[in-house]
Image: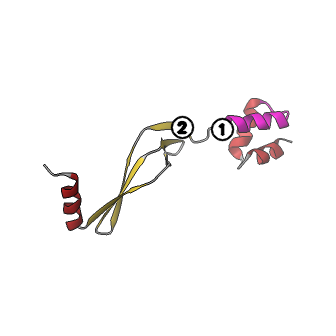
Amino acid sequence: MFGGNDMAQMMKQMGVDMDELDAEKVEIDLGDKKLVFSNPEVSRINAKGNEVFQLNGKYSKEEKNAVDEQDLEMVLEKTDASRSEAKEALKDSKDPAEAIMSLQ
Protein backbone atom coordinates (compact mmCIF):
# COMPACT_ATOMS: atom_id res chain seq x y z
CA MET A 1 0.00 0.00 0.00
CA PHE A 2 1.22 3.50 -0.73
CA GLY A 3 1.64 6.13 1.99
CA GLY A 4 0.76 9.81 1.55
CA ASN A 5 4.31 10.84 0.64
CA ASP A 6 4.76 7.90 -1.75
CA MET A 7 1.52 8.75 -3.55
CA ALA A 8 2.45 12.46 -3.82
CA GLN A 9 5.89 11.57 -5.21
CA MET A 10 4.44 9.11 -7.74
CA MET A 11 1.83 11.69 -8.87
CA LYS A 12 4.57 14.30 -9.32
CA GLN A 13 6.61 11.87 -11.46
CA MET A 14 3.55 11.35 -13.67
CA GLY A 15 3.15 15.11 -14.11
CA VAL A 16 0.16 15.42 -11.80
CA ASP A 17 0.05 18.32 -9.34
CA MET A 18 -2.61 18.56 -6.66
CA ASP A 19 -3.32 21.35 -4.23
CA GLU A 20 -6.08 22.20 -1.78
CA LEU A 21 -8.06 25.42 -2.27
CA ASP A 22 -9.18 27.44 0.74
CA ALA A 23 -12.85 27.83 -0.22
CA GLU A 24 -15.47 29.15 2.18
CA LYS A 25 -18.48 28.41 -0.01
CA VAL A 26 -19.19 26.80 -3.39
CA GLU A 27 -22.48 27.17 -5.28
CA ILE A 28 -23.51 24.96 -8.17
CA ASP A 29 -26.25 26.38 -10.40
CA LEU A 30 -28.76 23.73 -11.52
CA GLY A 31 -31.15 26.05 -13.33
CA ASP A 32 -34.08 26.53 -10.98
CA LYS A 33 -32.15 25.22 -7.95
CA LYS A 34 -28.64 25.43 -6.60
CA LEU A 35 -26.43 23.34 -4.35
CA VAL A 36 -24.60 25.33 -1.69
CA PHE A 37 -21.53 23.79 -0.06
CA SER A 38 -20.45 25.58 3.13
CA ASN A 39 -16.84 25.02 4.24
CA PRO A 40 -16.13 22.55 1.43
CA GLU A 41 -12.94 20.66 0.74
CA VAL A 42 -11.86 21.60 -2.77
CA SER A 43 -8.86 20.06 -4.54
CA ARG A 44 -7.42 21.24 -7.83
CA ILE A 45 -5.68 18.52 -9.82
CA ASN A 46 -3.55 19.51 -12.79
CA ALA A 47 -2.57 16.60 -15.02
CA LYS A 48 -0.50 17.65 -18.03
CA GLY A 49 -2.38 20.93 -18.50
CA ASN A 50 -5.86 19.60 -17.76
CA GLU A 51 -7.40 20.94 -14.57
CA VAL A 52 -9.92 18.89 -12.61
CA PHE A 53 -11.62 20.01 -9.41
CA GLN A 54 -12.78 17.65 -6.68
CA LEU A 55 -15.43 18.86 -4.24
CA ASN A 56 -16.30 17.21 -0.92
CA GLY A 57 -18.57 18.37 1.88
CA LYS A 58 -22.08 18.79 3.14
CA TYR A 59 -24.46 20.83 1.05
CA SER A 60 -27.96 22.23 1.06
CA LYS A 61 -30.40 22.54 -1.82
CA GLU A 62 -31.87 25.99 -2.36
CA GLU A 63 -34.41 27.33 -4.81
CA LYS A 64 -32.63 29.71 -7.12
CA ASN A 65 -35.43 32.26 -7.06
CA ALA A 66 -35.84 32.17 -3.29
CA VAL A 67 -36.47 35.55 -1.70
CA ASP A 68 -34.52 36.70 1.35
CA GLU A 69 -36.97 37.05 4.25
CA GLN A 70 -35.39 40.29 5.52
CA ASP A 71 -35.67 41.85 2.05
CA LEU A 72 -39.28 40.75 1.85
CA GLU A 73 -40.10 42.31 5.22
CA MET A 74 -38.45 45.57 4.16
CA VAL A 75 -40.50 45.74 0.95
CA LEU A 76 -43.70 44.99 2.87
CA GLU A 77 -42.94 47.76 5.41
CA LYS A 78 -42.26 50.36 2.72
CA THR A 79 -45.17 49.57 0.38
CA ASP A 80 -48.84 48.63 0.47
CA ALA A 81 -48.13 45.51 -1.56
CA SER A 82 -49.36 42.06 -0.65
CA ARG A 83 -46.86 39.40 0.32
CA SER A 84 -47.11 37.72 -3.10
CA GLU A 85 -46.71 41.05 -4.93
CA ALA A 86 -43.64 41.89 -2.84
CA LYS A 87 -42.10 38.46 -3.53
CA GLU A 88 -42.69 38.83 -7.25
CA ALA A 89 -41.16 42.32 -7.27
CA LEU A 90 -38.07 41.04 -5.44
CA LYS A 91 -37.67 38.17 -7.90
CA ASP A 92 -37.90 40.60 -10.84
CA SER A 93 -35.52 43.21 -9.40
CA LYS A 94 -31.85 43.38 -8.52
CA ASP A 95 -32.35 44.58 -4.94
CA PRO A 96 -35.02 45.60 -2.38
CA ALA A 97 -34.80 49.30 -3.30
CA GLU A 98 -35.65 48.54 -6.93
CA ALA A 99 -38.52 46.31 -5.81
CA ILE A 100 -39.90 49.08 -3.60
CA MET A 101 -39.67 51.61 -6.44
CA SER A 102 -41.49 49.27 -8.81
CA LEU A 103 -44.36 48.85 -6.34
CA GLN A 104 -44.91 52.57 -5.65
Q: Quadrant of residue 68?
A: top right
Query: Relative to the observer, which residue lies in front, 66 or 85?
Result: 66
Amino acid carrying mark 2 in the image = Glu
- Left or right relative to 20: residue 70: right
Picture coordinates of residue 69 (x, y %)? 68, 34
Q: Which residue is mark 2?
A: 62
Residue 49: image location, x then y, percent: 32, 69
Task: Give yes or no for residue 66 being in the magenta stretch.
Answer: no
The residue type indicated by label 1 comes to Val
Magenta part of the chain = 69-82
Check the image and name the residue furthest to the left. 1
Is the magenta region chiefly helix, strand or loop? Answer: helix
**Residue 13 makes an appearance in the image:** yes
Image coordinates of residue 102 in percent, x first then y, are 81, 45
Q: Is 25 positioned to the left or the right of 90 in the image?
A: left
Q: Dot 1 surroundings within 10 Å: few (below 14), some, or many (20 or more)?
A: some
- In the rendered image, which residue does mark 1 sit on? 67
Residue at the spot 72% in from the left edge and 47% down from the top edge: 93
